[in-house]
Image (cartoon, coloured by chain):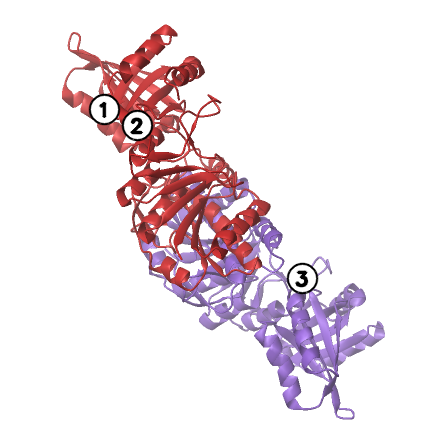
Chain colours: A red, B purple
Amino acid sequence: MAIVVQKYGGTSVGTTDRIKAVAERVIKRKKAGDEVVVVVSAMGKATDHLINMAKEISPNPNKRELDMLLATGEQVSIALLSMAFQQYGFDSISLTGLQAGIKTTGVHTKNTITDIDIDTVKSYLDAGKIVVVAGFQGVNENGDITTLGRGGSDTTAVALAAKLNCICEIYTDVDGIYSVDPRVYPLAKKIENISYEEMMEMASLGAGVMETRAVEIGCKYNIPIYVALSSEEKRGTYIKEYDETMEEKAITGLTINDDILMVTINNVLHKSKNVSIIFNKLANHHINIDMISQTAPLHDYVNVSFTANLEDEQAIDEVTRELTDEMPGIEICKDSNVAKVSVVGIGMKKQSGVAGTVFNIFSDNEIEFKQVTTSEISISYTIDSRDTNKAALVLAKGLNL
Amino acid sequence: MAIVVQKYGGTSVGTTDRIKAVAERVIKRKKAGDEVVVVVSAMGKATDHLINMAKEISPNPNKRELDMLLATGEQVSIALLSMAFQQYGFDSISLTGLQAGIKTTGVHTKNTITDIDIDTVKSYLDAGKIVVVAGFQGVNENGDITTLGRGGSDTTAVALAAKLNCICEIYTDVDGIYSVDPRVYPLAKKIENISYEEMMEMASLGAGVMETRAVEIGCKYNIPIYVALSSEEKRGTYIKEYDETMEEKAITGLTINDDILMVTINNVLHKSKNVSIIFNKLANHHINIDMISQTAPLHDYVNVSFTANLEDEQAIDEVTRELTDEMPGIEICKDSNVAKVSVVGIGMKKQSGVAGTVFNIFSDNEIEFKQVTTSEISISYTIDSRDTNKAALVLAKGLNL
């Protein structure tokens, strides 16, 4: 008898009929002899509906109250799913993030899990119950209800699996991890096994299927994560420790992210203090930045560019106002007609020449790029968003993904 | 500077615009120098929507999970109302029942408050915040989320006022307490002041405006309760200790309740054990019964009648099945075409003849009654539901209400 944590996303629990279907699926696993902890997201568009109500009240709603509001979405799902188990004759209990002992810290709407007091979940499992836990939420040191931000339910699921030392299965509306988003490049290959490191790069670069944080926790505690369809039985993708059975390809995948904007700050007086003021302000507003680049100083002035998520646009505008007050000479441009294209592969550690190959493909196809950044196992390019699909196609073909 | 607890019902917070209107109303009070605790119900039809989803999953959903589900309704309201205060520039915090320290016990969906750990609410009031508390909910000894059943938000409000030793204002969609439901008898008079005892009888007999439990708590802790409209400024009704300024009328009001059913059990063998089996079973199923009557034994058999709330019909059917198994000779009839008409007045303690007057009015108007029960300050009659309006009119006129 093994324990398994299964996570079902918002689409999988989008209607009461789908909730019943999830219950039937979980019951199969339970009948096969496993103890199951189920983590669920809010039903379909429930979160959007809640956010819309909040926006009707306030253009910029208080974030503690936004967490209080959003947490109801998952609470509805867990209650309904647990009712479904009991309707089918299986003992079950639903737990909010607080009840499941999920302790978090940080700023509201973007909390991180610090620890899970797993005793409650374990005691209900020991009593033979199917335990249904609200994803995406927890409680902070003040007893306030918190949420974990984007992909938070995956993080809840993997963190619970880490505490229970068991496999984590993420059921979603895609049938696994692909080398390239199949919506962009339909010939993309599904990856059967991918290492944590590669998946983290893919995730942080915008692959969309799994968020980086969840994979990080899997990596840290060596918890295998299985990503597959919730609607049918079809082999998905295992995310696990790198081993020699994984193909040693230079490039595993290609990711595209067009939910970004590029900010360029021109005419910054070339003192390291000035640049640090800029990035401190961004950090104070909890803006995640990426792909920083800086030109060489010319007449004591430098230009600084970075990319950020579109969702932080309002906070960036706030920083822009503050900066232009403090540094009257600077000029700030914001460009949302950009996309980030990245190639990822653990083999890049050993094989050189990937950057060169990509540069050649871009120049052969007349694709201009605005920024380049590299990590040990990835290279990313900011390009004009008009070129996104073209870049994806030529790179996928050229790199045989 | 005084503390006040204000409660706003589901209609008053039914839309985001109405939530803003409630916020404006509360802010006026805050500006006048009072510290305000606001208790709110779920938005308009939110609870019905949640119950419908539960019924799609299970015809008889698990009650612990139903509480988990229903509690989200108030959580949405408190978050949105607190956002509204902050949007208007007032510091505020929302608290779930659990966070507000509302401890409960009993069966799920019908819990009662055992105590309130008021420190959290007090500390936020001391910090100058408007405190917004979810009505209708609490937490039991196991840490499960519970709900308080019908009228639960009023109970939350009065219990908080009792702990804070302050007045409790209930804002609703009726402008006060009337001697007779104005929908039935438009000439009914609004009561300016009513004693706890009379209001408890009115409430328990089905007056609809306030539930008995809330008034009981007000009575026990001598907390004045003010009931008035939320949508305009218009004098409402004070519920408070009886004093000589209240008119010493024999009869204060008349209540009608047609959400009842009358159950008659014929041919029960006349042993006290048999009757106690019946009422024990009803108690075990948490069915509140009322107006018990029993005929004199004939050939060692008796007939027993009682009334109950229509909402317990399913549980009564369950008891009926069990009883007919155990006592094959009995015959059980259920009649939902009945209504209960009651006259209430603290003056009935001192003035006799009320029962006689009512019997005369009924016989003059050819209204048959099926059962009569009396308390110290009330008399109730079960009549055919066809006669309800007629009975209300002739009693209201005849008793000068």
Give the quarter of the image for residue A305. top left
**B374 over B174 or under it: above or below:** below
Which picture quadrant has residue B165?
bottom left
- List the residue tagged with mark 3: B189
Pick the residue in front: A246 or A159: A246
What type is the residue that disc 2 sits on? Glu
Q: Badge 1 is on which residue?
A: A350
Asked whether the residues under the numbered discs 2 and 1 touch, taking CB atoms below 8 Å apart as contact, a structural biologist would say yes
Q: Label 3 crowding class (10 Å Cα cut-off): few <14, some 14-19, many 20+?
A: some
**Is residue A155 among what the camera can see?**
yes
The chain ID associated with circle 2 is A
Q: Secondary structure at mark 1?
A: loop
Label 2 belongs to which residue? Answer: A248
Is disc 3 placed on a helix, strand or loop? loop
Q: For mark 1, name the chain.
A: A
Left or right, residue A279 beside residue B258: left
Residue B231 in sight in this render: no
Left-right relation of B295 to A141? right
Q: Residue at x 60, y 58 (%)?
A: B176
Q: Tell me the quarter of the image containing the C terminus of chain B.
A: bottom right
